[in-house]
Image (cartoon, helix red, strand yellow):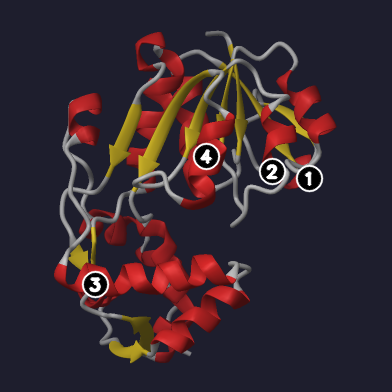
Amino acid sequence: MSTVLVIGATGRTGRHIVTGLRAAGVTVRALVRTPDLADLPADVELVAGDLQDPAAVRRAAVGADAAFLLWPWFSSEGAAAVVAELPRRVVYLSTLGGGGFWGEIEELLKDRDWTFVRPSGFAVNTLAWAEQIRAGAVQLPYPKAARSLIHERDIAAVAVLALLGDHHIGQIYELTGPEAITQEDQVATIAGVIGRPIRVEALTDSAARDAMLAQGADPLLADSAVTYWASLVSSPEPVTTTVATLTGRPALTFATWAREHAADFPADR
């Protein structure tokens, strides 16, 4: 493996993937919309372009031995044309269980040398609560829903291993954090780290659905997400040992993530 194309290199997981690949001596290429704003190391090859433009993906993929694919939208529309331009070896960031549009993209990759990295909920997504935390209260659907949130560094560590080793071809890796933690306990963990009390207020199903629609989710996905949160009250997300098995160290806890990201949460007004 000499050159790897990283799609999503400027994201929170992608930056760690870039770091891991560079540490392994791999040449990293990144498809980015605005190279001047990418803020990536100087030795990363930057290709300007949009992921929804197959021609841009084709330019970025020329000469690459493999690609890491992140698809950032709530629909697989347009993905087939993009997948067709990728190198034969692809590590795809899917989701736990591989359902919905993530599964549709997995199907598009089945004629390639694929590895599917399927993480549970990203711990980093709790940064979406930042402004509510500033105000002292976080509104959540089903506060007692328990998720096995995963640190973005653990996702990246597995993705790098998968990109570097051919024995990962054809493997599906279900990744989680080391424990299932309720949403209200996630808030409490952040409160403890930043040293401020934070209330939790339960959202109705309709309010939670409307919030997802406002973020660009289609109605079916919004409905299924609310149903899923409800199920996690009595049936928490599973906890796997895949991170530990592949990396040789325990998966990082949510408390570790919160301590590392304490500065990302705003101070009081």
In the figure, residue 174 lies in which quadrant?
A: top left
In the image, 212: left or right of 116? Answer: right
**Which residue position holds label 3?**
145
Residue at (50% x, 71% y) in the render: 222
Look at the numbered disc 3 and give the secondary structure of its residue. Answer: loop
Q: Position of residue 111 (x, y in %)?
A: 56, 19
In the image, 225: left or right of 242? Answer: right
Gap in Å between the C-alphas at discs 1 and 2? 6 Å
In the image, 235: left or right of 171? Answer: left
**Which residue position holds label 2?**
38
In the figure, residue 216 lies in which quadrant?
A: bottom right
Mark 2 is surrounded, within 10 Å at the Cα level, by few (under 14), some (14 to 19) or many (20 or more) other residues, namely some
**Which residue position holds label 4?**
15
Please tell me which residue lies in front, 220 or 147.
220
In the image, 183: left or right of 211? Answer: left
Gap in Å between the C-alphas at discs 4 and 1? 16 Å
Look at the numbered disc 4 and give the secondary structure of its residue. Answer: helix
